[in-house]
Amino acid sequence: MNTKTIGLAVLAAALTSSVLAQEAGTNSQFITIPREQYLLLKKLADEYPKLAEEMKEMKAFKAQAEVTLKKVAPQQAETDQALDELDKKITDVKKLAKDSAPGTNKFLLTGYGSAGFTAQNRGGDKKFAATFNPIFLWKLSDRLLFEGELEAELEGADTHLALEIAQMSYVLNDYMTFGAGKFLNPANYFVERQHMAWVNKLPDKPLAVYDGLLPESNLGMQLRGALPAGSMKFGYAVYVANAPMLMIDPATVAPSDFGKLEFNNFDNSDHHVAFGGRIGFQPFPELEVGYGMQYADVTPRGVGVNAIHALLQSLDFSYVRDSAVLCGTINLKGQWVWSKVSDFVYDPTSLAGGPYTFSNKREGGYVQLAYRPSRLDNPILKNLEGVVRADMLNQAKTAAGVDERRLTFGLNYWLTPSSVCKVAYALDRQRGSNADPHDTLMIQFATGF
């Protein structure tokens, strides 16, 4: 219905209402209305047949439109469903393209380096040293990752290059990640979390836990993750790897190293496998305690002895807090390690005295306290950090023949959040048949990048 038709209908209704009002107000046979209204009514009466025809056409158009919509509605539903499926396919293709992107598109070069000077008394070492540890990280997809680390350090007249880490990781879910390759030993808290030059608070590493009674890295597979428990959190890691090698061949092993475990057994020459892991507990964010262990058969091939097993255990803790009362940050850490190799009787023909009964138990660890007045306003004092560490290694009853105790004092100055200058002095005390103590002055510059 057009605008003209609607307007006429409204006007007719108004005039009819006026006539009825006048009729109700008089009993006369004739009704008098203004001439203008009369002419409008006559015009409407003349156009009524045309209006009726237009109303009929509108009803027919409406009926036809309803029939057409009934036919189109199913087709529209099918079209909407097809568009939804197309959007889903496009989303899947985009995700596949993203997941298939080469790792070089998401590559990070990081790492750390250090340079330092060591001076020991009583005829010990006096030397400069430098190390460089580049770390390569690739993100092949949201779930697939690769991590590699090299260590370059000076040894004698040569530069020694070592592969520290080469691990592929796959994120199974929010609580579990699978890894395979060469990875830092999760059972050794210091090595996995603290050994980096700019993270370690002192220029040297503590006894027993580094280059000591626990492997620093493993070659194998691991499964690790974390589980929340309210405000608390549990962390876990389990692994299977090449077992260490027991050093008992007098033709190739120095007398003081007899019975030690060689952890860098990359060829797995004795064909044994080690099982281990660590579980950590955080009752609140500032504190974590953990227990790690490793168990392995270390019986040498071709040696006529009963099965020999090595059980390595570790307890560790870490407490870090920014204290307003102390105007700074306190950092308390510690770790203790036990190494137990089965008792056995070894009868090398090159050793005089016949069969040799060997008992191989070693233990050691450290505790360390650091304080930095980071809340002070003084720009010099707030970047200073004092450190004290006590560490020890007990193996006098083994072929090593020495127990060692050290007390180290250090002072650090932080140039940036990841660059530090360290000065430390270690008091060394030893006892046993092979004792050779040396107090040591150490200076080191370290940076992470």
Image (cartoon, rainbow, N blue to C red):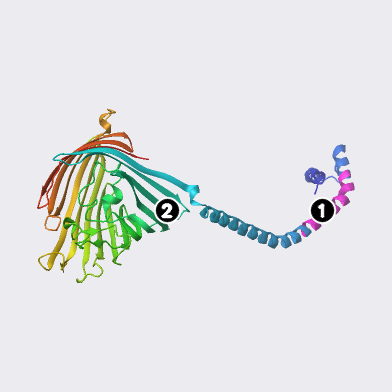
Q: Is residue 445 above or below residue 144?
A: above
The quarter of the image holding the C terminus is top left
- State the extent of the magenta-drawn residues as a range: 43-63
Instruction: Check disc 1: other Cα within 10 Å, few if <14, some if 14-19, many if 20+.
Output: some
> Residue 180, position in %: x, y?
38, 59
The residue where tag 1 is placed is: 55
Q: Residue at x 43, y 54 (%)?
A: 145
Residue designated by label 2: 146
Q: Is residue 446 visible?
A: yes
In the image, taking residue 34 as reference, residue 140 lies left or right, namely: left
Q: Looking at the image, how many numbered discs can be counted on the residues? A: 2
In the rendered structure, which amino acid carries the disc numbered 1?
Met
Answer whether labels 1 and 2 touch (C-beta < 8 Å). no
Residue sitting nearer the eye, 34 or 334: 334
Left or right relative to 147: residue 128: left
Looking at the image, which is closer to me, 261 or 30? 261
Which residue does the image show at 67% across and 59% down from the upper left? 79
Residue 20 seen in the current view: no
Magenta stretch holds residue 212: no
- Residue type at mark 2 is Phe
Q: How far is the residue under mark 1 from the one under mark 2?
A: 77 Å
Q: Residues within 10 Å of mark 2 (few under 14, many from 20)?
A: many
